[in-house]
Image (cartoon, rainbow, N blue to C red):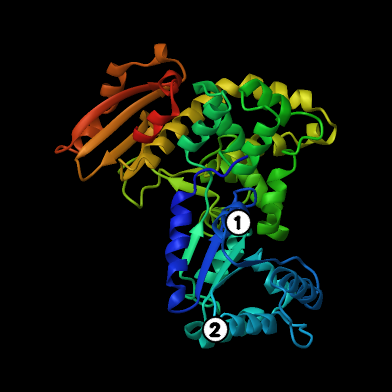
Amino acid sequence: MRFYDRANELEALQKVHAQLQSSSRLSVITGRRRIGKTRLIRQFCLDRDNLYFFISRKSEEILCEEFIGYIRESFQRRIPGRITRLIDLFHLLFDWTETRELTVVVDEFQELAQVSPAFLAEFQNLWDSRKENSHLHLIVSGSVYSMMHRIFLDHGQPLYGRADLVINLKAFPIATLAEILTEDQAYSADNLLSCYILSGAIPRYLEILRDNHALTRDRAVDLIFSDYSVFAEEGKNLLIEEFGRDHAVYFSILELIAAGKTSRVEIESVLESGVGGHLARLENDYSLITQYRPFNAKPGSRSVKYKLNEPFLAFWFAYFHRYRSAIESSNTAYLKQRFTEQYPQLAGYWLERLFADICLQSGNFNRVGSYWEKGFTNQIDLVAINSAAKLLVLAEIKLQKKNLRRERLIRKAENIRKQFPDHRIEYRCLSLSDLEGSYTGLRDW
């Protein structure tokens, strides 16, 4: 699959790179596996002198031997002596870049804490002492989000404050997902929604679907729920290292949220234990869930729900994790049947999330959410506000246009309208059919 999107990220990296004339620079790229970190970095490094180091859990001496061999092969440069410590390898790179610019990529940087526990503290001293007199663009990436966040953004860590740029790479925007479908002659509103649910607009999953000619809903479902599906273990592969030995509790919480148990009370009633600390860590340390309240509710409001941030993980926990016994017994037909039966309800929920993402990505609104009153009455699917233009958009969202009722929306909005007396109110009745046509319209929604 060709390189898509990421124009903002490439521009940000280029701005940092342009500062190499004065001193070395450090760029940090985080994001979960499959999100396209390595592809972004390789795209940036095209036509630039660069070295790429992948940190695997080998001995420090073996890694040094590999990297020195790569340097010799790439630049035909003689390396004096024998280097067995990674910090000495970076001493060499700083010597080299006193008279030239060089981009050095260190992939899975967080693994250095396992390979060489002293490295981060040693590198802090080296970076601080050599940065000003060298021209090294060090780009580090890592897929264990919590560890990368801690290394570079925790006040107590040696490399806190050293990064010139931190990019947390996300899934493709909706318009890019639609562009991929259009180029493959597979664009329709239904395929856009199903791809959003099944792939989460994550580059690697889209590449798998495209390579297998499975961007349409039926073909995607056949592929994903097939025997030996590459998707079956993905949630575990993505998160088990993040959670470590507590992974069972975290997985249970995420499964419950994916299944519609979205309040703390509901989750605790099923697990029969307190989960306040786990929910806080899932939100703040792992960035996997978000707590949300009715639009414009006070921060201390007790009307709190939780949602998974990533569509693919929500899908994976709702099916592959929830029905684990079916996976273990190779009963993928059962899994596919459950998904097919539940798809209308699932699609209705994710259509609301899809329109919310379109609103956010349009850049036309500074806040987007949903609204409900006590007892979950007068629920409004989508509320978006442009405070500068004093515009409040209220939307009802249904899969089928025939089920939309503008007068019902106006009636439910009576109380929220009173909270914005000086705003122009715009009512929208949105359905799946509003996504038909060209993807280009999504950019200006």
Q: Is residue 272 left or right of residue 431?
A: right
State the image coordinates of residue 193 (x, y, percent, origin top left): 53, 27
- For residue 200, the mark is none
**Amino acid at the residue labelled 1:** Arg
Q: Residue furthest right?
A: 329
Quadrant (top left, top right, bottom left, bottom right) of the N terminus: top right
Disc 1 from disc 2: Cα separation: 24 Å
State the image coordinates of residue 291 (x, y, percent, origin top left): 46, 47
Query: Which numbered mark, 1 or 2, is in the foreground of this view?
Result: 2
Which secondary structure, mark 1?
helix
Q: Is residue 113 left or right of residue 427?
A: right
Specify whether residue 105 is in view: no
Residue of label 2: 98
State the image coordinates of residue 268 (x, y, percent, origin top left): 58, 46
For residue 206, which quarter of the picture?
Answer: top right
User: Dot 1: few (<14), some (14–19), or many (≥20) neighbours within 10 Å?
Assistant: some
Q: Residue furthest left?
A: 422
Q: Residue at x 19, y 41 (%)?
A: 389
Q: Nearer the viewer, residue 85 or 113?
A: 85
Residue of label 1: 42
Q: Does residue 138 lie above or below 131 as drawn? A: above
Which secondary structure, mark 2?
loop
Q: Residue at x 40, y 41 (%)?
A: 361
